[in-house]
Image (cartoon, helix red, strand yellow):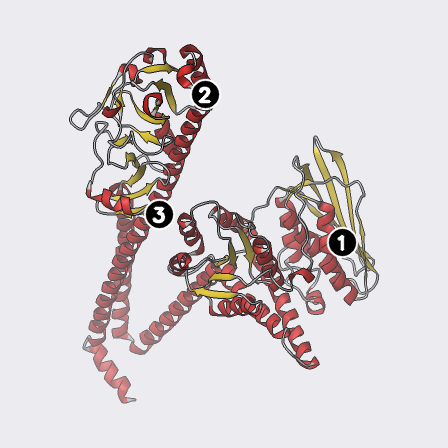
């Protein structure tokens, strides 16, 4: 017998292997508990970070809503002055009061509008009780209220009561009762000296609280509206009104930063108004948030302990079996470990693949196609050019397959949405067919198209998805047709009041489909028989995706076919009549895009090295100067350092993404001039485009990036001095 086996048997009899197993079990328990603790704290940090971002977003919204409210009030006051030719005190008080009431009618934020003469006596008001009373403006205005431009709207301190005639101005010594009605006076001085007129707007704080209640996500969220001198104007806290902002030390930082967060007193975000003398704060109750985290952590810990208890029990049984049969137990342990490792590796690979496929597959394809295009633009002999054309064609074919797989996965996940926008269906078809014509000519097929001359336009629908379905059906027809023709026909019925039913048919003279196979062809990864895949290729997803897209648009894809004679695929969509006319967009001929109007100073934010090389090479080849930022944070730091003509911004980058960087760049800009920011991203969903535009970006290009599209985009935004104002 082998000495190792003998020695191992002696060790088993003495209990050495069981003690070793218990030792490893202890280490495993410690490692699992350490992993649980680490996960819990990482989960806590991520949770707090999300809540801080939510607080910051809410502060931005609250400040914007409040500034818009004050802007409307200021415009209303100027409307009063313009209506009386800036001679308010020359207008009879009853006539002026009627004018004020008409203007206040559309201002839900106002309780009253009052006009004071130079002696600070109410001359006219939407509230008759206010007329004739004298107001000491120094009670609620800052010390510098009487100075500065005459059109500066100033915010007073909280006035306890429903209006000027029924309350008093609060002070730090005598704060108001939080349960009693109150208002905030906003004062605008018109004129100067003896001719000065003061217009006082009594702002209803309940209106402002109603604004924030529309977007708050938790009843524990707390909001404050604070004057720059620290006086609290509106708060959701149950505290007396008119107190100073706390903590006072934070005011110094708020004066220096327009937008920020603070953790010393819970989760708080603040935003300072760029136009009016106030800032807003949003506080999130971290105790309530962390309570759910603690509950979740305890649940994970309990499940972990239960799992560990099971592992311990199994280990004890296995240890006893080790004593009886060393070799058998060791083999079992090896098999278990190998199976576990394979399962974990497979699960990790699947999760990583599904998580990154949508973005990461298009990114290298951008490099392959883009660098191939660049190489094709160099001096090549005929053989090299033929090889590279093959590479490009293969890459584009692969991109089609990838897009089909991604579209199918989005459809299966319910994440694919359809649009309803105005479009010209006849033009869409005419723009789609040239590319299909090339593929038909390659096989010697005739491509025919019939479009009614009176086809209504514009219609409401999703032009991108309709184009995709027509392209899929035409490509499918060309694939299975060896001789003859492919025909595209459009027909419609209905009228503008009820909408139009548009029928699209694609016919071919190909191999046809047997009756028992016609339902099968719309199933994923299926074709009429397995020999078709070998003969014609394809993923079997084209018709499946087309059928799902038509269903999402409210129609159904069908087929009429005779085996050996050809097939007709058809679908009918109900499309509404668009009210607005389509904007006329001038096409930019390719010949005019040989050179951009001038050399541009371009800031490129891109983290992928291949894409950096591709875009930089293209831009420098066209005579532009390119400065590279490897993430959004660097782009934000570089933006103020030069007069950029264009910013090209990737969306997904480490450290800081493109959407956040764009928001910060837009916050730095002042005046009407805005530098064009163009998204260049592998995210190709329609919702991704909307998200980019809502973040402040000017336009959007998806990867793989085409040089002609990039050059046209640059020409569009830089061809005239005011192209991006």
Question: Mark 1 highlights which residue?
Answer: 515
Task: Decide which of 277, 438 is in the foreground and name it.
Answer: 277
Up the image or down, 634 lies above or below 368; here it is above
Taking the view exactly as shown, the residue that stands out farthest to the front is: 194
Q: Residue at x 35, y 74 (%)?
A: 334
Residue 386 in which image quadrant: bottom right
Residue 258 placement, left or right of 578:
left
Residue 629 horizontal/vertical position (percent): 43, 63
SS under mark 1 = helix
Task: Decide which of 265, 632 is in the foreground and name it.
Answer: 632
Q: Residue at x 47, y 63 (%)?
A: 353
Task: Decide which of 627, 355 is in the foreground and name it.
Answer: 627
Label located before the other in sequence (3 or 1): 3
Label located before the other in sequence (1 or 2): 2
Q: Which mark is residue 53?
A: 3
Q: Residues within 10 Å of mark 2 (few under 14, many from 20)?
A: some
Label located before the other in sequence (3 or 2): 3
Q: CA distance from mark 1 to mark 2?
A: 72 Å
Residue 339 horizontal/vertical position (percent): 40, 69
Question: Marks 1 and 3: in contact by CB < 8 Å?
Answer: no
Q: Residues within 10 Å of mark 1 (few under 14, many from 20)?
A: few
Q: CA distance from mark 3 to mark 2?
A: 38 Å
Q: Residues within 10 Å of mark 3 (few under 14, many from 20)?
A: some
Q: Quadrant of the N terminus?
A: bottom left
Residue 249 in which image quadrant: top left
Residue 337 placement, left or right of 503:
left
Question: Marks 2 and 3: in contact by CB < 8 Å?
Answer: no
Q: Which mark is residue 103?
A: 2
């Amino acid at each position: 017998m082998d000495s190792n086996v003998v020695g191992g048997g002696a060790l088993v009899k003495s209990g050495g292997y069981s003690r070793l197993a218990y030792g490893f079990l202890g280490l495993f328990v410690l490692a699992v508990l350490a992993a649980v603790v680490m996960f819990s704290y990482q989960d806590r940090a991520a949770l707090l970070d999300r809540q801080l971002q939510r607080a910051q977003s809410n502060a931005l919204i609250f400040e914007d809503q409040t500034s818009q409210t004050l802007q409307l009030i200021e415009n209303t006051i100027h409307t009063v002055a313009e209506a009386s030719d800036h001679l308010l005190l020359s207008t009879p008080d009853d006539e002026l009061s009627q004018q004020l009431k008409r203007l206040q009618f559309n201002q839900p934020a106002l309780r009253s509008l009052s006009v004071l003469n130079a002696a600070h006596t109410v001359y006219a008001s939407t509230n008759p009780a206010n007329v004739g009373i004298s107001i000491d403006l120094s009670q609620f205005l800052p010390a510098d209220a009487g100075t500065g431009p005459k059109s500066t709207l100033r915010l007073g301190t909280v006035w306890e009561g429903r209006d000027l005639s029924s309350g008093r101005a609060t002070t730090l010594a005598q704060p108001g009762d939080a349960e009693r009605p109150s208002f905030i006076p906003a004062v605008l001085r018109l004129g100067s000296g003896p001719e000065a007129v003061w217009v006082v707007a009594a702002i209803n704080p309940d209106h402002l609280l109603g604004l924030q209640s529309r977007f708050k996500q938790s009843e524990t969220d707390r909001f404050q509206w604070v004057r720059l001198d620290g006086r609290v104007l509106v708060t959701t806290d149950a505290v007396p009104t008119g107190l100073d902002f706390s903590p006072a030390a934070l005011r110094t930082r708020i004066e220096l930063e327009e937008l920020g967060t603070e953790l010393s007193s819970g989760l708080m975000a603040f935003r300072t108004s760029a136009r009016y003398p106030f800032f807003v704060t949003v506080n999130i109750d971290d105790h309530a948030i962390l309570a759910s985290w603690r509950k979740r952590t305890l649940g994970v810990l309990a499940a972990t302990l239960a799992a560990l208890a099971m592992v311990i029990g199994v280990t004890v049984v296995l240890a006893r079996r080790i004593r009886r049969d060393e070799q058998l137990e060791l083999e079992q342990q090896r098999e278990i470990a190998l199976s576990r490792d394979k399962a974990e590796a497979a699960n990790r690979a699947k999760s990583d693949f599904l998580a990154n496929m949508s973005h990461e597959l298009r990114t290298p394809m951008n490099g392959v196609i883009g660098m191939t295009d660049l190489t094709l633009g160099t001096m090549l002999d005929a053989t090299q050019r033929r090889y590279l054309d093959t590479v490009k064609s293969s890459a584009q074919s692969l991109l089609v397959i990838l897009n089909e797989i991604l579209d199918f996965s989005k459809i299966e996940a319910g994440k694919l949405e359809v649009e309803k926008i105005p479009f010209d269906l006849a033009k869409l078809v005419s723009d789609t067919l040239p590319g299909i014509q090339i593929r038909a000519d390659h096989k010697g097929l005739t491509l025919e198209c019939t479009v009614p001359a009176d086809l209504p336009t514009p219609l409401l629908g999703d032009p991108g998805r309709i184009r995709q379905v027509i392209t899929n059906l035409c490509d499918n027809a060309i694939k299975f047709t060896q001789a003859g023709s492919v025909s595209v026909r459009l027909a419609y019925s209905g009228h503008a009041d009820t909408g139009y039913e548009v029928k699209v048919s694609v016919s071919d003279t190909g191999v046809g489909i047997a009756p028992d196979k016609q339902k099968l062809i719309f199933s994923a990864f299926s074709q009429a028989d397995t020999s078709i895949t070998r003969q014609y290729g394809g993923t079997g997803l084209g018709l499946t995706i087309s059928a799902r897209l038509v269903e999402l648009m409210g129609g159904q894809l069908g087929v009429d076919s005779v085996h050996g004679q050809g097939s007709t695929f058809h679908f009918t969509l109900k499309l509404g009549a668009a009210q607005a006319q389509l904007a006329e967009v001038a096409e930019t001929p390719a010949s005019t895009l040989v050179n951009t109007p001038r050399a541009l100073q371009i800031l490129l934010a891109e983290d992928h090295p291949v894409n950096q090389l591709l875009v930089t090479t293209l831009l420098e080849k066209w005579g532009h100067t390119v400065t590279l930022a490897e993430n959004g944070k660097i782009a934000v730091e570089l933006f103020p350092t030069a007069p950029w003509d264009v910013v090209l911004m990737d969306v997904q980058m480490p450290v800081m993404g493109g959407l956040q960087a764009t928001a910060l760049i837009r916050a730095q800009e002042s005046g009407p001039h805005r530098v064009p920011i163009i998204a260049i991203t592998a995210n190709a969903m329609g919702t991704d485009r909307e998200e980019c535009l809502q973040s402040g970006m000017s336009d959007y290009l998806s990867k793989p990036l085409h040089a002609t599209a990039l050059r046209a985009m640059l020409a569009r935004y830089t061809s005239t001095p005011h192209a991006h104002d």
